[in-house]
């Protein structure tokens, strides 16, 4: 089982390139970054209630940062957890993903989600009521652009005539896709035959039931934002999960490096 880090990189914490180098030096497998384009003032509360953490307001663009991380690392898998795909132009996103896969030498993984902030998605012109159906079409359109020299797609939400778009991804047929979320996301991952990012759990005993949402389908699972708990690691490994990521707080550089040292001690038998 691979172990990586998932986090929010902001303009107030450690930089992406320094974080990437530190992870590679400590033997971590991957770095997965969160995305928010903005936070509308009217929705600046967390999904569980209360004031939204500052990192949501300050998060940087993950694609730009991961390009910089790719330039200073050699082995580190880089990716998103998650890209808010329903807020993005699908043609631009196809090119961004393919370009990042190219410049990283095929090290990109594409975690996507429908998001929770309805005001944020509405600002992008996305109807929250149909965001799941929109994502289904976006995933199909992305695959067409990545795998076909002459790609076209005609759906209810996404519609374009034949087009050319290069580069194509280094990974074939395309970078791994992981869909983040709960039961609905698990069902979407099954339908598309891609990976799943389940919500983090704190109790190892809850993991079998959580993974049972896949209904026996053998899909790649990345459990993100878990605590650095040996019991959780053992339980996820026993369940056959392919990757877990520790949730790294957004901190200044010196504090981040100390936290990574502690994380590495916990993960030592897996790294």
Image: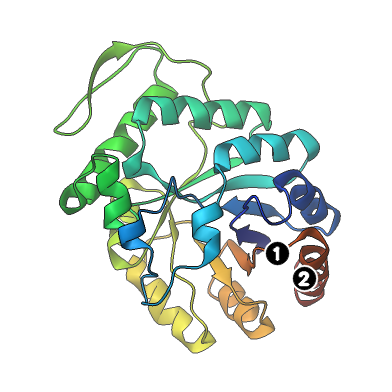
Q: Nearer the viewer, residue 117 or 163?
A: 117
SS at mark 1? Answer: loop
- The quadrant of the rendering that contains the C terminus is bottom right
Q: Quadrant of residue 219?
A: bottom left
- Above or below, 146 relative to 106: above
Relative side of 7 to 136, left or right: right
Estimate the x, y position of residue 234 in percent, counting from the top left: 64, 80
Residue positioned 65% across, 34% down in the render:
67
Residue 170 in view in this figure: no
Q: Quadrant of residue 6?
A: bottom right
Q: Nearer the viewer, mark 1 or mark 2?
A: 1
SS at mark 2? Answer: helix
Judged from this view, the residue extending furthest toward the right is 25
Residue positioned 47% across, 80% down in the render:
207
Estimate the x, y position of residue 145 in percent, counting from the top left: 38, 23
| C-alpha separation, residue under disc 1 versus residue under disc 2 | 9 Å
Residue positioned 39% across, 11% down in the render:
164
- The quadrant of the rendering that contains the N terminus is bottom right
- Above or below, 262 relative to 143: below
Q: Which class describes the residues within 10 Å of circle 1: few (<14), some (14-19), or many (20+)?
A: some
Relative side of 75 to 33, left or right: right
Relative side of 200 to 9, left or right: left
Residue 104 in view in this figure: yes
Give the residue at mark 2.
259
Judged from this view, the residue extending furthest toward the front is 41
Instruction: Determine whether label 1 and label 2 are within 8 Å by CB.
Output: yes
Give the residue at mark 1.
251
Q: How many marks?
A: 2
- Above or below, 141 relative to 86: above
């Amino acid at each position: 089982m691979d172990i990586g880090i998932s986090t929010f990189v902001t303009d107030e914490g450690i930089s992406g390139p320094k974080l990437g180098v530190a992870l590679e030096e400590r033997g971590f497998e991957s770095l997965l970054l969160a995305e928010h384009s903005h936070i509308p003032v009217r929705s600046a509360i967390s999904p569980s209630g209360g004031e939204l953490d500052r990192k949501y307001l300050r998060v940087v663009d993950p694609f730009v940062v991961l390009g910089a991380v790719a330039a200073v690392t050699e082995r580190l898998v880089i990716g998103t957890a998650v890209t808010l795909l329903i807020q993005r132009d699908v043609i631009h996103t196809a090119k961004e993903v393919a370009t990042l896969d190219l410049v990283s030498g095929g090290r990109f993984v594409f975690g996507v989600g429908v998001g929770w902030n309805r005001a944020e998605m509405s600002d992008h012109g996305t109807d929250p009521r149909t965001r799941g159906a929109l994502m289904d079409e976006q995933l199909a359109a992305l695959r067409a652009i990545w795998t076909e020299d002459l790609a076209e797609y005609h759906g209810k939400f996404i519609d374009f005539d034949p087009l050319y778009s290069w580069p194509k991804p280094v990974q074939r047929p395309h970078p791994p896709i992981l869909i983040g979320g709960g039961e609905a996301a698990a069902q979407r991952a099954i339908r598309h035959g891609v990976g799943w990012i389940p919500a983090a759990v704190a109790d190892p005993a809850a993991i079998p039931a959580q993974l049972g949402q896949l209904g026996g389908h053998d899909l790649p699972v990345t459990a993100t934002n878990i605590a650095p708990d040996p019991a959780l690691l053992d339980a996820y490994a026993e369940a056959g999960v392919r990757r877990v990521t520790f949730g790294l707080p957004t901190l200044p550089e010196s504090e981040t490096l100390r936290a990574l040292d502690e994380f590495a001690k916990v993960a030592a038998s897996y790294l």
